[in-house]
Image (cartoon, rainbow, N blue to C red):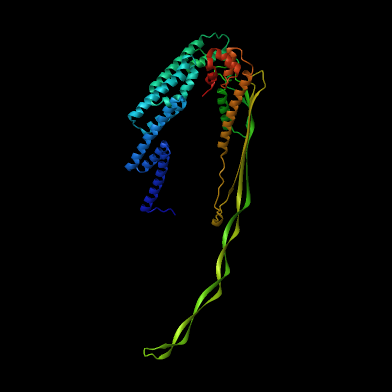
Amino acid sequence: MFRLLPPLLLLVVLGSACATLRGRADELARNGQFVEAAAIYDELVTKNPFEKELVSERDGLRGKALGQLLGNARRYRLEGIDEKAEDDLLRFLDRRAQWNSKLNGGLESSLLEEMEGTHKHLRLTISSPAKLGLALTAEETLVRKRPLLSHKEMVVIQREMESVVVQSGKEVCQRLRDVPSDDAPHWRELVSRYCRHWREFAPEPPPAPELTAAPSWTGQVGGLDSARMELLRTRLTRAFESSPWFSPAASHHPELSLAGRFTTLRDSRSVELTAPYTEKVPYTDHEERTETVEVPYDVEEEYTDKNGEKKTRKVTKVHTYTRSFTVAVTRYRDVARTFEFHALRLSVEHELTLSSSGVLDARRGPMSAVLQDHLSESAYEHDVTFGPGDVSPRRANFTPPESWLEERVEQMSARFAQTLQEHWRESYCTTPARTLDEAARCARAGATLPTPAYQVLSEVLGDDAARVPSLFVTR
C-alpha cells in the first residue's frame, strides 16, 4: 500500500536530494564545467524558486559558463581554428538566449571581437567563393552556419552573406542561360533547375526521351485486398516520381509489374506449463541444550558468640552444577516445487514477398526490386493465478498485421527508389560523359558524379559541379 511520508520526513528526503545535487554541481564547478553545473542549479532553483542563495549561485555559474564559452571561442580564433571558435560562439549565444543573460562590459567587448572574427571568416568561406561564381558551394557553407547566424546578434552578417550568395546564384544563372544548348535537353533542364533554385527564370525544355510519366501497374500480390494494393501502388508511384526517370511533362507511361504474396498463419494449441517455486517445509530437529542447576543443602558451622563461646548453627548453602539435555525444535527448509497448469499457446506468422519489375531502358534488361520479410510471434494465454510461482493471467498481444504490412510497404518503397537511382546510374553514368548534356543526364541520379561527368560540368560550373546533383534531389 502506498503511504504518504510524514511532512518532516518528506522535508528531510527532499533536503537530502537537493544536497546531493548541489554537491554534484559544486564538484562540476570546481572542475571548470560551469555549463553543466549551471544546468543542475537550474533544476535546484526550479524546485526551490524562493531560495535566494540558490538563485545567486546559479546566476554566478551562468556568468562563469558564458565567460568560459566566449573565452574558448576567442582562444580558438587566435589559434586560427575558426570552425571550433564558431562552435563555441554558437554555444555561447544559445546559452545567452536560453538564460536571457545580460553581459558585463568585458563580455560585451569580447563578443564584438568574436563577431568580427566570424565576419572575416565567413567572408572568406562564403563571400569569396560566391564572388567567384561558386554559389552552390557558398550556399552549402551558409546553410551549415545558419544556426549561428539565426541569433539576433548576427542578423547583419546573416543578411550580408545571404545577399552575396543569392546575387552570385542569379549571376551564374544568367551566364548558364547564355551557354549554347541546342539539342541538349538534360543540360537545359539542369540550367532551369539551377535558376529556379535562385528564383530566377530559365525555360524548361521538353522532357528528354529517356524520361517517362508515372508508371502503369499490372499484376497482383496474393493475399492483399484492394485497399492494400492501392496503398502499395501509391507508395511505389510516389517513389517513382522522385526518381531520375520521372518527368511530369512526359507522355510515355512505362508498364511495371507487381508480384508476390502476403500470408498470415495462426495456430492455437493447449500446452502444460510448469512454474517453479520454493516452499518452506517444517521438520522436527533435536537441539542440545545446557542449564545451570542450584541445589540447596544444610550444613552446621561453628561460630563464636559475643561472649566468646563457641556454638554451632545450621546454614543453607547452594550446590551449583550444569546439566545437558535434548529438546525437540521445529525448523523450516526450502523445498523446490513445481506448479503445473494448462494454457493456450497462440502463434502468428506473417510472410511477405514483393517484387516490382519493368523495362525502363530499352538497351538493358528489366529493372527489378525485391523485398522478402517475415514475422513470427508467439505467446501464452491463460486465466490461472498462483502467487508463489508468480503466475498471473496472461493475454496474447501480437503486432497488428496492418501496421506490420505498412512498414514493409515503406521499406519496399525505399528499396524501389534506390533501385531506380542505381538503374539510372548504370544506364547513364558508366560511360564517360563527353558533352554537357551527357554529364547533366548523369547528374539526374542525384548522387556523387563520376570523375568524367564532374570534369565536363566543372568547365562551366567550377567546383560547384560537385553540388549539381543536389538540384535533382526531390525533397
The answer to whether residue 42 shows anywhere in this view is: yes
Q: Give residue 465's quadrant in the image.
A: top right
Question: Which sits in the foreground, 38 or 2?
Answer: 38
> Residue 349 appears at what percent x and percent y?
62, 40
Question: Which sits in the foreground, 92 or 144?
Answer: 92
Whether residue 104 is situated above or below residue 363 in the rendered picture: below
> Residue 197 appears at what percent x and percent y?
48, 18
Residue at the (39%, 34%) spot, across then down: 65
Whether residue 382 is situated above or below residue 314 in the rendered picture: above
Split into 4 quadrants, where in the image is the N terminus? Answer: bottom left
> Residue 23 appears at what percent x and percent y?
41, 44
Question: Which sits in the foreground, 89 or 338?
Answer: 89
Question: Which sits in the foreground, 233 or 177?
Answer: 177
Left or right: 123, with 226 as reference point: left
Left or right: 35, with 287 as reference point: left
Residue at the (55%, 69%) spot, across then down: 329
Whether residue 336 is situated above or below residue 211 in the rendered picture: below
> Residue 140 appears at what percent x and percent y?
49, 21
